[in-house]
Image (tube, rainbow, N blue to C red):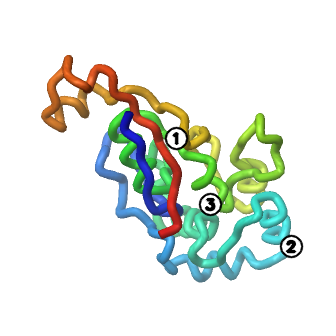
Amino acid sequence: VICLSGQMQAMTLVSADNREGVRPAILTSDTRAQIQAKELVDEKTALQVATTSNYNGQESCLANWLWLQQDAPGDLAISETILFGAHNYIAWRLSGKAVCDLTTASTTGLFDKTSPTSAYRWCHDRLADRGIVDSERLLPTLQPASSVCTKITDVMVEMLGLELGSWVDDSYVVSGSGSLG
């Protein structure tokens, strides 16, 4: 089993056509979304925080997503998914599955913390209220950190120079959880 962990709240746009990423990741320390963060400070933000229990201004995934829509809409248009941590990106590369663990999701400000634990979900309705488009298409599948994504793809086995029939045949990728540091 390959279990991953990594810094969370980075926004990495990826597509099947560009496995290296559509653009450089927007890291949690990035403050380019200052204007968008100021636009978010109103009664709708209070409602967003009540739903997600998370909003941290210009460094938030919400503000950065709005920045992408305004300043890089072409990048969002050609993206297959948005991943929120290095561990999610590596899991995607190894398995071909776009997933996000619940720990990482819960820090993005995009995760509905009011839903019952049996129905983990992104807050697509609140995101639409904030002007976020395509969240249903772009957000990865939510799953507990201990969930198995899948086996390593044959393409990655070849790229990594591993031999089929060795330990690879019984290897699975577990997305793991994000880390704050």
Displayed quadrant of residue 138: top right
Which amino acid lies under the numbered mark 1 shown in the image of this protein?
Val
Q: Residues within 10 Å of mark 2 (few under 14, many from 20)?
A: few
* Residue under the image location 51 percent in, 56 percent down: 178
The Cα–Cα distance between marks 3 and 1, rounded to whole angstroms, is 14 Å
Position of 87 with respect to 107 (left or right) is: left
Which amino acid lies under the numbered mark 2 shown in the image of this protein?
Glu
The Cα–Cα distance between marks 1 and 2, rounded to whole angstroms, is 31 Å
The Cα–Cα distance between marks 2 and 3, rounded to whole angstroms, is 19 Å
Q: Locate residue 47, reporting x and y percent.
A: 85, 65
Q: Locate residue 58, reporting x and y percent.
A: 60, 78
Quarter placement of the N terminus: top left
* Residue under the image location 60 percent in, 38 percent down: 143
Q: Secondary structure at mark 1?
A: strand
Q: Secondary structure at mark 3?
A: loop
Tag of residue 99:
1
Position of 3 with respect to 67 (left or right) is: left
Position of 88 with respect to 40 (left or right) is: left
Displayed quadrant of residue 69: bottom right
Q: Residues within 10 Å of mark 3 (few under 14, many from 20)?
A: many
Q: Locate residue 165, reporting x and y percent.
A: 20, 17
Tag of residue 108:
3
Q: Which residue is mark 2?
A: 43
Which amino acid lies under the numbered mark 3 shown in the image of this protein?
Thr
* Residue under the image location 20 percent in, 22 percent down: 166
- First-in-chain label (3 vs 1): 1
Question: Which of label 2 and label 3 is nearer to you?
Answer: 3
